[in-house]
Image (cartoon, rainbow, N blue to C red):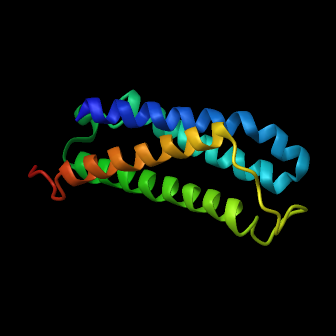
Amino acid sequence: MRALERAAGGLSLFAGLVHADLGPAHFRVWWGYGLFFAVAALAQLLLGLALLLDALDPARLGPSLPRLKRAMYASGIVGNALLIGLYVLTRTWGIPLFGPAAGGIERVAPLDVATEIAQAGTIALLATLLARTPKGYAAR
């Protein structure tokens, strides 16, 4: 399972670094777009580091480890799925509701596609980890 966590962590770090790199350009367009990219980057970077560094240490967490890991995996799945959904929305229907580019349809770029693939891979790996992590609590 550690190999799957490391792979998911690497993909999450990649996506987070891309969002962090694109953040300043989006801040120049509108603070709301920049803030969105900063929050997305931070969440993906933290998830990636937590997965790579095995931040949920079994020695410290004991019986609550499976519950916390399941929560981390589930939140990573939901967050990345929302980012993919927003990407598809902004490339088909347009930027929703807010900011000076609201309604505008963004272009598709190769780095975008690589990032979406990394996010989809993160989801697939986290879903596998979620399915393999026990639901119950260990007895004390």
**Nearest the camera: 29 or 120?**
120
| Residue 4 appears left or right of 115 | left
The residue sitting at 71% across, 53% down in the picture is: 36
If the image is split into quadrants, where does the N terminus sit? top left
Residue 109: x and y in percent read 69, 42
Residue 38 figure quarter: top right
The residue sitting at 76% across, 55% down in the picture is: 106
Vertical position of residue 93 compared to residue 136: above or below: below
What number of labels is visible? 0
**Nearest the camera: 131 or 104?**
104
The residue sitting at 61% across, 60% down in the picture is: 88
The residue sitting at 21% across, 41% down in the picture is: 62
| Residue 16 appears left or right of 118 | right
Vertical position of residue 54 compared to residue 83: above or below: above
| Residue 50 appears left or right of 56 | right
Question: Looking at this rendering, what residue extends furthest in the left direction?
Answer: 139
**Nearest the camera: 76 or 54?**
76
**Nearest the camera: 106 or 57?**
106
